[in-house]
Amino acid sequence: MRIVTRPDFDGIVCAVLLFQAETIDSNIKWVEPDEIQTGKTNISKGDILANLPYSPKCSLWFDHHISNKPKGNFQGAFDIAPSAAGVIYKYYKEKGRLDNRYDELVFHTDIIDAADLNQDQVRHPEKYPYILLSMTIKNLGYKDIAYWDKLVNLLKTLSIEQILSDTEIKSRCDKVVQENIAYEKHLIDHTKIRHGISITDFRCLDNVPDGNRFLTYSLFPESRTSVKIRFSGPEKKHVLISIGHNIFNKQGHVNIGNLLARFGGGGHAGAGGCTLKARTADNDIEQILDILFQNKI
């Protein structure tokens, strides 16, 4: 069997759990959701799809995104839950194929993926080991596959303290702290507030800055929802949109996952993303913003 999952902290923990619960005889296939939705990734019998949209070709499927809510029968489990890892953990514990060994790991995965964070965790992630580790996971053109595989292997058996003492991981964590400092200035310079929405547009930058995705909620507490816009690569053929309701301001009512599903994306009720064609992106963005401005349930 083969694990097919996405390269974020939830996806990595999904892989950790599936390695313990199933007989996995292939390398992990790391993909982004749009690669499933557009058929770019070949899914076949024996594949376990986790934290991704459903494919009828897979043998098992686990997910928790509201935009991916199934309409028919499938093998596996789906629930509107804080994390896909939590869905997997519950499923296999009920079958007696996982014990309580990963309670702490899944607990923190739930907090991180559901953005159930406080102000101190957002402003000072270096004080919170799991949050800091999760910020080292980035998809820069699939250049980090070896690192994602390494994290899966380490999380199977080692404590978070042992993992953070690894030379490579410590270096990446130190880099994340420095990136977050620079990212704050980029957010301030490239964000405007319109009708209660913070709109961060990085399309004017050759190098898209990276940093703490929750920081915008702390910097712009008056906004109920954040929208981040950037090109997907130097060829500038596609535009990436990320939207999230402010975790410290509970006034955002639009179901973001369902909204972005109309534009080829998806996600949760409180956060999601999509990829737009550059030539029509401005029109799509204005349609999305108009709905967010209305803020109707």
Image (spheres, helix red, strand yellow):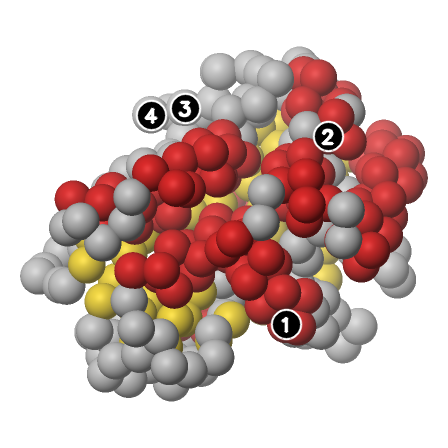
Q: Residue at x 68, y 57 (%)?
A: 138
Mark 4 or 2 closer to N-term? 2
Q: Can the viewer see residue 271 in this picture?
A: no
Left or right: where 78 falls relative to 137: left
Report how far apart the C-alphas of labels 1 and 2 lie in the structure: 24 Å
Mark 4 or 1 closer to N-term? 1
| Residue behind mark 4 | 297
Label 4 close to label 2 by CB (< 8 Å): no
Q: Residue at x 25, y 75 (%)?
A: 58
Categorize mark 1 by other alpha carbons within 10 Å: few (<14), some (14-19), many (20+). Answer: some
Picture coordinates of residue 295, whole percent (x, y): 44, 25
Quadrant of the rendered structure where residue 130 is? Answer: top right
Label 3 close to label 4 by CB (< 8 Å): yes
State the mark number for residue 125. Answer: 2
| Residue behind mark 3 | 253
Categorize mark 2 by other alpha carbons within 10 Å: few (<14), some (14-19), many (20+). Answer: many
Q: What amino acid is found at the position of numbered circle 3 in the picture?
A: His
State the mark number for residue 145. Answer: 1
Report how far apart the C-alphas of labels 3 and 2 lie in the structure: 27 Å
Q: Quadrant of the N terminus?
A: bottom left
Q: Can the viewer see residue 253 in this picture?
A: yes
Q: Secondary structure at mark 4?
A: loop
Report how far apart the C-alphas of labels 3 and 4 lie in the structure: 5 Å
Quadrant of the rendered structure where residue 238 is? Answer: bottom right
Q: Is residue 54 above or below residue 219?
A: below
Q: What amino acid is found at the position of numbered circle 2 in the picture?
A: Pro
Q: Quadrant of the C terminus?
A: top left
Left or right: where 65 falls relative to 223: left
Labels 1, 3: front one: 1
